[in-house]
């Protein structure tokens, strides 16, 4: 079974038993090759060690239109460092020797097209990746041209919904999704707003009432324990991106700072080392 | 015109594609905005009240029809019959305003309160700020930080017109980054804002909508040429291509008439092999840029390459999807001119005809000697803009 699917399945089973301590599942985004080219595996390992439930590795792109300034700048930096899709696959080659959490790649479609969709998916499967988030890949193109290739390599394609997405389209997305639905919390690019407002609350409740078949993770504006708890009360969990990139930017001890950040966000009092 | 409208095969299909190019490669955050436009643009354009307002403004405000002028001395030099379509005489100095007039009327009918736009050299920004002043709508123009430094007069014009000019500070800090910022602004303000794209680029329906607003150029060429020569169709139509809106307008009503050769001229910058060029079809590959599948200049890894041209209006790493299709299908003839050739051509037109062209249009002029047109043939060249904005560059070549 795909690692993402089984993660949510187990989480739900635990939720039913009401014995899990985390308020929700935590997905953390970071940009590959940032802050330094060869930090990718270090960051991934530290995220797993800190307790991230799944990880989204950003493939840097020159023109990331859905991302705010923090992630853009990390993309620019990673590209300057020499990051490419090929280098990333090289860095992740043996990742499954140590990494057990589900790992997704997030990025824009052009670098994937240049690599070749078929070759890209094959490489993802070989590496042990579980899913892709390509926000500028249209649903019809995915369904008509790429879905059979994704399926053949056991890769999930994660779709986004926003407060402006119509109910009909949400249902369509739910019908073709597997794993989870990426719920964009507000009309924004990444990193622009923080917290959960009244409007968002209403939007999350609207989504809840739709009884979708897929679990949801809420992203955009999640930055710390409080926002993580808030978001998790409306979904299976949440995604942190820009706030984590800022941690990486400012860190002079990556492993330690990453673990501390993840633990603080999840706030397992009994597992925090004194 | 009705007769050719029925068999247009180079136009967009009902899925939003031109052959293999086009589509709407946009994040979900933009989907409702683009979908709203897609669902409404054709019926709004077809509405008689829209047509009346659009045509009245083009006539009385923009100054259309623009002349089709037979350039006698230039014709004599190149031993053919050259007609210049004088888009340089449009209000604000270029064809750009045809599109912004159309789009501001579209925005009003969609109930939008605010306009966002991107600009490179500032021509589209000025044309957008102009129509926003005219219609009393709030106007935000994104411009690369580097371009703001290089194009101070147009920044001043936009500000005088009441627009807010916001710098794009990421990436290469030029046109493509300004386009990214304008898209992000639209993502952040999905309900009350309309994004006026300045060229035939972006997700469907933008390339088609902008081409329709620029199609007035070739509509006029047909009847004007008939007045001059007795025949509606020339042998060649030449236009420069950055994103390609003036070319799209100049080609529009000739697309299905294969006897008309459509010549698109790209900016070669310092030369095709110099590493400093903006000749997209010569140097690019198929991919996705700013919401459509097209041809773009990119690295092997699929990162968008920063182009180079003396002309800010041609300094764009892609072309519109329709142009990509014209290139791939062989319907269009794609040529390029270097910075040096363009400047020479600008001086030639100025000295032969007393018209100072924009640097962009000068690229189209620069290939006249290589065209191979004969004395019995007719050439229409779209003179897309005037050279006032480029005087600082031209001054360097005087003496």
Image: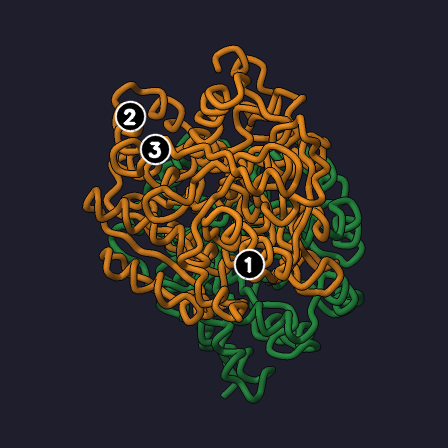
Q: Residue at x 37, y 27 (%)?
A: B40
3D distance between C-alphas at marks 3 and 1: 38 Å
Q: Which mark is residue B64?
A: 3
Q: Colour of chain A?
A: green
Tell me the orange chain. Answer: B
3D distance between C-alphas at marks 2 and 3: 17 Å
Residue B291 falls left or right of residue B116? right
Quarter of the image holding residue B321? top right
> Which chain hosts label 1?
A
3D distance between C-alphas at marks 1 and 2: 35 Å
- Nearer the viewer's eye, disc 3 or disc 1? 3
Q: Which residue is mark 1?
A: A63
Residue B221 horizontal/vertical position (percent): 48, 27
Q: Which residue is mark 2?
A: B50
Q: Few, some or many C-alpha atoms within 10 Å of disc 2 (few <14, some 14-19, many ≥20)? A: some
Q: Residue at x 71, y 31 (%)?
A: B329
> Which chain hosts label 2?
B
Q: Mark 2: which secondary structure?
A: helix
- Nearer the viewer's eye, disc 1 or disc 2? 2
In front: B379, or A200? B379
Do we see residue B246 in this rendering?
Answer: yes
Residue A93 falls left or right of residue A162? right
> Which chain hosts label 3?
B
């Amino acid at each position: 079974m795909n690692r993402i699917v089984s993660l949510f399945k187990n989480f739900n089973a635990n939720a039913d038993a009401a014995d899990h301590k985390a308020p929700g599942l935590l997905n953390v985004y970071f940009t590959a090759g940032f802050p330094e080219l060869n930090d990718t595996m270090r960051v991934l390992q530290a995220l797993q060690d800190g307790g991230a439930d799944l990880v989204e590795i950003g493939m840097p792109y020159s023109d990331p239109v859905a991302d705010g300034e923090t992630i853009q700048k990390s993309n620019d930096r990673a590209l300057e460092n020499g990051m490419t899709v090929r280098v990333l696959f090289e860095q992740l080659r043996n990742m499954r020797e140590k990494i057990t959490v589900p790992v997704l790649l997030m990025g824009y479609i052009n670098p994937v097209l240049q690599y070749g969709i078929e070759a890209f998916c094959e490489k993802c499967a070989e590496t042990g990746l579980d899913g892709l988030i390509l926000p500028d890949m249209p649903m019809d193109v995915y369904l008509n041209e790429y879905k059979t290739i994704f399926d053949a390599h056991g890769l999930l394609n994660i779709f986004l919904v926003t407060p402006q997405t119509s109910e009909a389209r949400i249902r369509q997305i739910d019908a073709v999704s597997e794993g989870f639905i990426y719920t964009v919390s507000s009309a924004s690019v990444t990193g622009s707003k923080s917290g959960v407002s009244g409007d968002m609350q209403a939007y999350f409740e609207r989504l809840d009432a739709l009884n979708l078949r897929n679990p949801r993770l809420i992203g955009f504006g999640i930055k710390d324990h409080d926002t993580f708890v808030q978001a998790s009360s409306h979904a299976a969990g949440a995604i942190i991106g820009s706030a984590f990139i800022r941690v990486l930017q400012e860190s002079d001890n990556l492993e330690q700072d990453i673990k501390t950040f993840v633990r603080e966000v999840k706030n397992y009092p009994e597992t925090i080392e004194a | 015109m009705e007769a050719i409208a029925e068999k247009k095969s180079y136009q967009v299909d009902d899925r939003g594609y031109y052959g293999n190019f086009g589509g709407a490669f946009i994040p979900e955050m933009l989907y409702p905005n683009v979908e709203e436009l897609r669902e409404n643009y054709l019926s709004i354009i077809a509405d008689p009240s829209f047509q009346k307002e659009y045509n009245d403004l083009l006539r009385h405000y923009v100054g259309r029809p623009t002349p089709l002028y037979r350039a006698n001395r230039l014709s004599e030099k190149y031993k053919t019959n050259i007609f210049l379509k004088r888009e340089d005489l449009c209000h604000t100095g270029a064809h750009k305003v045809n599109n912004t007039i159309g789009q501001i009327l579209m925005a009003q009918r969609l109930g939008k309160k605010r306009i966002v736009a991107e600009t490179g050299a500032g021509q589209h920004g000025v044309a957008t700020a102009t129509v926003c002043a005219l219609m009393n709508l709030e106007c935000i123009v994104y411009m690369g930080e580097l371009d703001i430094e290089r194009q101070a007069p147009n920044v001043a014009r936009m500000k005088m017109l009441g627009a807010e000019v916001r710098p794009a500070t990421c990436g290469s800090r030029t046109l493509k980054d300004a386009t990214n910022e304008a898209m992000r602004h639209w993502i952040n303000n999905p309900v009350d804002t309309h994004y006026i794209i300045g060229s035939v680029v972006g997700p469907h329906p933008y390339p088609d909508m902008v081409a329709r607003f620029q199609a007035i150029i070739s509509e006029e060429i047909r009847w004007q040429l008939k007045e001059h020569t007795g025949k509606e169709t020339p042998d060649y139509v030449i236009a420069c291509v950055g994103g390609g809106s003036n070319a799209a307008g100049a080609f529009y009503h000739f697309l299905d008439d294969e006897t008309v050769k459509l010549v698109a001229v790209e900016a070669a910058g310092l030369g095709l092999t110099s590493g400093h060029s903006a000749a997209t079809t010569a140097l690019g590959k198929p991919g996705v840029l700013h919401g459509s599948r097209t041809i773009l200049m990119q690295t092997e890894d699929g990162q968008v390459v920063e182009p180079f041209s003396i002309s800010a209006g041609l300094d764009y790493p892609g072309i519109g999807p329709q142009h990509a299709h014209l290139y791939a299908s062989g319907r269009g003839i794609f040529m390029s001119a270097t910075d040096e050739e363009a400047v020479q051509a600008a001086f030639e037109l100025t000295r032969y005809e007393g018209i100072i062209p924009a640097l962009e249009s000068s690229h189209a002029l620069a290939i006249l000697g290589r065209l191979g047109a004969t004395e019995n043939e007719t050439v229409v060249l779209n003179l897309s803009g005037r050279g006032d904005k480029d005087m600082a560059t031209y001054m360097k070549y005087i003496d």
